Amino acid sequence: MAGLEPRVEYLESFRCPLGGLAAGKPRVLCHGAEIFVSTGSEFVYVYDQEGRLLTAVYRFPGQVWHLELWAPRRLLYVLCAQKGIYCLSLDQASRSVNQGDGDDRGSEDSEPPCAAVPVHPDACLLPDDTLCTFTVVDDMLVTLAQGPARWKVQLSDCPCPGEDARPRGQIGEVELSTSSPLAGAPGEPTAPHILPVLCCVCPPGSSALQGRTRGSRGCLLEQALFGLLFGVDASLLESPVILCGLPDGQLCCVVLKTLVTSRLSPGDPKALVKILHHLEEPVVFIGALKTESLAEDAEDTHPDCLVALGHDGRILAIKASWDEAGTLVPELREYQLPGPVLCAACGGSGRVYHSTPSELCVVDLARGRASDRGPGGLPSLLCPAGLGICSVVTLSVSCEVPEGGARLLALSARGRLMTCSLDLSSEMPCATRAAVADTGQKIKELLSGIGTVSERVSSLKKAVDQRNKALTCLNEAMNVSCVLLASREGPRPISCTTTTAWSRLQPQDVLTATCRLENNSGLSLDRGWALCVQVFTSTPASDTDVAGSATTYTIPVDRLGPGDRREDGICLPLSKHTVDMLQCLRFPGLATPHTQPSGLLGPVSDSVDTFLGSLGPRSEPAGPASLRAKFLPPSVATIKVSAELLRAALGDSHTAGTSLGCATLQWLLAENTALDVVRSRRLSSVQGVAPDGTDLHLTIREVAVTHLCTAGPIQTVEIQVESSSLASLCSAHHAVIGRLQRMVVEQAAQSSSPPDLRVQYLRQIHINHETLLREVQALRDRLCTEDEASSCGTAERLLQVYAQLRSPSLLLL
C-alpha cells in the first residue's frame, strides 16, 4: 500500500461559494500544457502548466454545465445553463469576444484572479434552454435535451472552419423513455439535480474521436464487445454509438449513423434506442478500460471493458467472455463501492478512480492482478484502496507511464486545482479469502462504530434539545417576570381571582375555593408553570403569638396562551373539634356557694314549672326516661386497667401523696372546668349531671384481679360509670374507652412484656363473650318479628345482655 500514496502538487486556487463546489458541473480538460477549468460558475479558466500562470478567463452569460475541446480546430464548446451551446475559437479569440471590453467583475460566488473577457452573444452556436449535456463527434454535435416527460437525443451539423458559426441544421432526433416523469410544468423545464451523462463509443479503426482531449467523453472499444453490445448494424457501419446515462438509472444507447439515416426514412423511433442496463440510481460516469494483460510482442489493443458508475456507489462492468458452450456472450457484473460518488475516471492497467466526500479511491479490474475472479475474468469482489485525498469534484487522467504510474488532474471542493502523481508499480490489494475475511471484520467494526456514533449523536441531540427547552423556559420566565414587575399599577396582565362557596360534592357540605387564572398579556405560559394557592388557618385574636398553619395546593398549568383563562377548584380544610361527655359534665355539689355559677346548680328550670311548683305538688312526667329512672335500677359499665399501665401513662402527674384512683379521675377530667376542684379535694368518686339533666356517677377504685395470672393477683384500677339514663351512660363509657385506647397505643412501644397469663382462663372469657354477642344478634332479630306484647320480654333480656357486655372480665395490660 506504500506505492499508493500520491504526491500532490497544488497548481492554482479558485474562489468558491460557501460550502464548497458542488459535484456534477465542474470540469477539467487537459491538452498539452494547457488546462481548461470550469468550477460550475459562468467563468472558464485557461491555465498554463509550463509557465504556472493563468493565461485567460472567459465569462459566459450563464453557469457552465459542460465543456469540450476539439483539438484539431482549437475550438472550445461550452454549454451554459438555460442558454445553449457556445463555440469559442482559442486561436482567434478576438472574433468571439468584445475587444476592449474587459470586465473584472466576479459572480456572486467567485471572483476571477485576472480580467475576465465576456463572450459575445454571437458565439452561441445552438441556443436552446432545454439542453442538459452534449458531446462532439467528428463534425456533428450530439445534445441531450430535457422535455416535459422524456429526454431527447438530437443530432446537428457543426460548421467547418471559415463557415458561418451557426449549425447547418438538425439531422435527427429520438426520444428516450423514462421510468418517471421529469420535474417541472410543461413548457417550463427545471434543472435536474444530477445532470445526465453522454459518452461516445467507437469501434476500432474509427476516426470519429481523433483530436479528443483527455477528460472528454469518448472512448474506443474492442470489436468483440462492441458487436455484442450494439449489434451487427453498428459493427458493419462502423458507426459511433452514443451512450446515455440518465438520472433515473437507465443506460441507453443510440447508433449514430442509424439516427442520421432516420432523417430520410424515420421508421419506428423506438427501434433506434436500446436499453443496456438499469442501475436503479443516477448514472454519473461512463467509461472504458483495458483489463487483459498484453504479451511482450503483442500490439496495443483497445479497451475491453465498459464501466458505468451510479451516484450511490453501484458500478457496472461489461466484458465479452466465453460461456460453457463456447459462445461469445457479454458478461455483466455489478459491484458496490463507497458512495456517494462525486466524480470518476478510467485509467490505464484496468484501474478506475472514483471520489467520495471522504476519500479518493482506486479499484483494479485488471485480470493479471486479481486472484479471485469469476468465469469471464471479472473479479467477484472489488476492494477500494484510498489515496488520502478527499472531496474531489472533478477528475481526469492527464498522463500515464509504462511502469504503472499515473498522473491525475483534479479540482477539489474548495476550488484547488492539483496534480496527483501515483506510483502504482506495487500490487493492488486483491480479493483473496483472507482479504474477504478481513473485509468482513472491518465491516463489523465499522457498523459497531456507526452504532456508537449514532448513540452519541442521539444523546447529544437530546442534550441540545433539553438545553434549548430550558433556555426557552428561562426566557419565558424572564419575560413574564418583567411584565409583572413593570405593571404594579393598574390591571395586572396575568391575574388570579378567588371566590369561595359551599358545595355539595360529597355526602356532606364542603367549602370550596375557585381560582381563576387569566392571561391578558401577549406571552404564553407553557409547561413548567404552576399555580400555587396557600390557605392559612385563622387564629384567635387573643393568641397573637401562635402562628397559624398553612396548606399549599399546586395546580400545573399545561398551556395558557394570550387571552386564555383557566379555573381549578380546591376544597378548603375546616377545623373540627369533638366534645365528649367527660368534658361537658357539671358537678353542682363540688362548687362553693359564693363561686357556684347559676348555670351549674342544675338543669335550667322553666318559669312556668317554678310557678306551678310554688302552688303545690304537681304530677311527675310520665315519659320513658322518668319511668326507667323510677322503676329500673341504674345502668352500670366497668373497665379494668392494670395499675402498672396507669402509673406508666400518668408519669409525673401521679404524685406520692395522691392515690392512683384520684390521679386516674383527674386524668379523665383533665379537659373539664371542674378539674381544679377535683384535684384540690383529691376525690376518687364524683356525682355529675349530663347536659340533658340526667345524673351520672363516676367511681374509681383499686381492686385485685385473681385467676388471671399464674404468679398471683394483679393490682388493677376499676373505672365504673353509673347512670339512670342509658344514653348518658353510653356517652360517658365511649369517652372513657377513647382515652384508654390512646393511652394503650402510646404505651405499647415502651411497656415491657405482659405477665404470664392463664391462657385457658382467657379463652373461656372469650368464649363467653362470643356467646353473648350471638345472643344479642338473635334477640335483635326477634324484635323485628315479634308483636308489641311479646317484645317487652325480649327487650328486657337484651338490656341484661348489654349490661353483661359493659362489665367484661377482661383487663387492659
Image: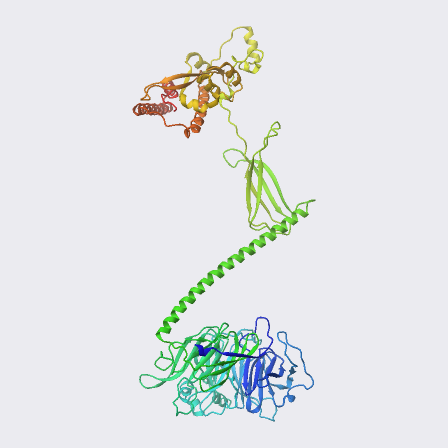
| Percent coordinates x, y for residue 307 in the rendering | 44, 81
The quarter in which the C terminus is drawn is top left
| Percent coordinates x, y for residue 169 in the rendering | 57, 89
| Percent coordinates x, y for residue 540 in the rendering | 60, 28
The relative height of residue 250 versus residue 580 in the rendered view (above or below) is: below
Left or right of 16 in this view: 228: left
Residue 687 or residue 463, whichever sits in front: 463
**Does the image show residue 194?**
no
Residue 330 lies in what quarter of the image? Answer: bottom left
The quarter in which the N terminus is drawn is bottom left
**Does the image show residue 300?**
yes
| Percent coordinates x, y for residue 427 in the rendering | 41, 80
Give the residue drawn at x 60%, y 49%.
564
In the displayed orientation, state which residue is furthest to the left. 760
Left or right of 27 in this view: 430: left
Give the residue drawn at x 57%, y 12%.
608
In the displayed orientation, state which residue is furthest to the bottom. 162
